Amino acid sequence: MAHVIVVGGGPAGLSAALFAEKNGLDVTVFDTDGTWMHNAHLFNYPGVGSIDGTSMMENLRAQVDSFGVDRHQDEEVTDVAAAGEGFTVTTDDGEYDADYVVLATGANRDLAESLGCSFDGDVVDVDVTMETSVEDAYATGAMVRAEEWQAVISAGDGAAAALNVLTKEKGEHFHDFDTPDTATETFGSFGEE
């Protein structure tokens, strides 16, 4: 099974983790809780009438955890390097290997720079799937956008990265469509009222 490491626990990182894990990939997330969402209140996120950013993040973490993502809370990534056909992610607690890496560190682009990703001005250069110039390395959210720092855009970037990884792994264009008749039996009742 492919292993995906996601660096960052905001909307982009947790969205990537959710899409990848629920579709059969092994996902590890490093989340330092440095998200700007703690300063936000959402009125413009589809399907959400009104919620403060901290509550939104608590909900998103609970959803990701319910799918079995290996989330390392408060473990900071200090380096990401290409290693063979994958990546090695370094923290103060150790090294972790992965086939794919998704960088979701907000406007902090240091890890992308040290990995050797190309830049377009001040932002990480990615294609429509969020893949960087380094094969199998993805950058999302504020890392790739000069000013479009909306939670819903970042979450979409994370989903795009995960869907591209799934497409590579499954050998055909992958779609993540759940239907009401199978969603509850397959994924439980998270979020039902």
Image: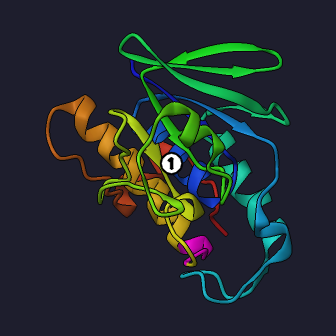
> 178 and 74: which one is in front?
74
Q: Residue at x 79, y 33 (%)?
A: 76
Determine whether 99 is above or below 163 in the image: above
**Local SS, label 1:** helix
Residue 162: image quadrant is top left
Q: Is residue 161 above or below residue 41?
A: above
Answer left or right for 19 relative to 17: left
Residue situated in front as seen by the camera: 174 or 177 = 174
Q: Is residue 112 left or right of residue 129?
A: right
Residue projecting furthest to the front: 121
User: What residue is disc 1 on?
Assistant: 16
> Neighbour class for label 1 at 10 Å: few (<14), some, many (≥20)?
many
Which quadrant would residue 177 be assigned to in this image?
bottom left
Q: Position of residue 50 (x, y in %)?
A: 74, 86
- Specify start and end residues of the magenta stretch as a single range: 148-152
Q: Position of residue 86 (x, y in %)?
A: 42, 18
Residue at 85 percent across and 36 percent down: it is 74
Residue 82 against residue 34 in the figure, above or below: above
- Comparing 173 with 81, the one in front is 81
For the C terminus, which image quadrant? bottom right
Residue displayed at 55% across by 41% down:
113
Residue drawn at 63 percent across, 54 percent down: 190
Q: Main secondary structure of the magenta part?
A: loop
Tell me the amino acid under the disc marked 1: Ala
Image side of residue 29 versus residue 74, left or right: left
